Image (tube, grey):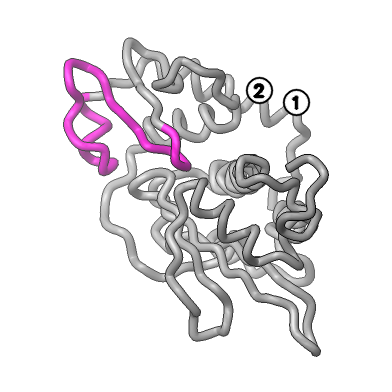
């Protein structure tokens, strides 16, 4: 399995995706990726609760505000996908989407640590942030976790399972992708998607009036 990229390498990866996107054709790509027909060469995207626009070879936030490089890089990679097909409806962790047997620590563990740090003891705060980030509650899963579904891109749904702490176990958060995900994006992009999900949830926690580390209603910065 590939070694983790540094922050600078991730930035370079995202810039490369945006550069390559300039040569892509919205009229060809958009319909097959669940984005509908391009309107005059323009394609709108709803990504983690925020609107973006792909037009004239560039991708930007529709409100004209600043957009994160990783967010833009992930969308650009998706928009260039040649993947075709339907979702499978089975959700798997990052490590099981490679076809390689993973032992010991999962590749997702380090990526999701910030979520546990911020939300581990505060499911209510997590649920508020999840809603602001465009998530939809699926209720309690058979595993006992609270399940949330995010669809930042039509062919790239992400499921988050939140296991609240009890007398025996600490809180746990798992991030899962539809089993079809590798058909539409590269493995690197799935790592990037998990990183972006974490960023969006932490940002949404701030919008919900808390830093994520304090009990609801008791954050000094709220």
Which residue is located at x 75 percent, y 84 percent?
Answer: 166
Q: Tell whether label 1 touches label 2 (CB within 8 Å).
A: yes
Within 10 Å of the Cα at label 2, are there few (<14), some (14-19), or many (20+) other Cα atoms? some
Q: Secondary structure at mark 2?
A: helix
Q: Secondary structure at mark 1?
A: helix
Determine which quarter of the picture holds residue 88.
Answer: bottom left
Image side of residue 27 versus residue 102, left or right:
left
- Determine if the magenta segment contains residue 40: yes
Question: How far is mark 2 from mark 1, CA to CA?
Answer: 6 Å
Determine which quarter of the picture holds residue 59.
Answer: top left
Where residue 174 appears, as percent x and y from the top left, is 63, 66
Along the line of sight, the residue nearer the viewer: 130 or 74: 130
Within 10 Å of the Cα at label 1, are there few (<14), some (14-19), or many (20+) other Cα atoms? few
Query: Where is mark 2, residue-wise?
Result: 12
Image side of residue 169 versus residue 80, left or right:
right
Along the line of sight, the residue nearer the viewer: 177 or 149: 149
Where residue 204 appears, as percent x and y from the top left, is 60, 43
Span of residues in magenta: 27-50
Q: Is residue 59 above or below residue 92?
A: above
Along the line of sight, the residue nearer the viewer: 83 or 126: 126
Query: Where is mark 1, residue-wise?
Result: 8
Determine which quarter of the picture holds residue 100.
Answer: bottom right
Which residue is located at x 71 percent, y 58 percent?
Answer: 216
- Determine if the magenta segment contains residue 29: yes
Where residue 220 appears, as percent x and y from the top left, is 82, 44
């Amino acid at each position: 399995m590939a070694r983790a990229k540094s922050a600078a390498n991730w930035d370079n990866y995202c810039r490369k995706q945006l550069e390559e996107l300039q040569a892509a054709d919205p009229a060809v790509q958009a319909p097959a990726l669940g984005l509908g027909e391009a309107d005059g060469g323009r394609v709108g995207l709803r990504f983690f609760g925020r609107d973006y626009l792909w037009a004239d070879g560039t991708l930007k936030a529709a409100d004209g505000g600043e957009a994160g490089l990783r967010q833009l890089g992930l969308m650009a990679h998706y928009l260039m996908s040649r993947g075709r097909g339907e979702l499978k409806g089975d959700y798997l962790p990052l490590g099981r989407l490679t076809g390689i047997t993973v032992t010991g620590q999962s590749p997702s563990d380090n990526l999701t640590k910030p979520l546990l740090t911020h939300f581990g003891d505060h499911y209510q705060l997590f649920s508020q942030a999840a809603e602001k980030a465009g998530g939809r509650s699926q209720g309690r899963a058979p595993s006992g976790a609270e399940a949330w579904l995010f669809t930042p891109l039509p062919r790239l749904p992400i499921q988050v399972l939140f296991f609240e702490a009890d007398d025996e176990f600490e809180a746990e958060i798992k991030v899962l992708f539809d089993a079809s995900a590798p058909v539409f994006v590269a493995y690197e992009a799935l790592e990037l998607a998990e990183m972006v999900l974490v960023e969006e949830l932490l940002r949404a926690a701030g919008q919900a009036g808390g830093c994520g580390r304090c009990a609801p209603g008791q954050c000094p910065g709220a």
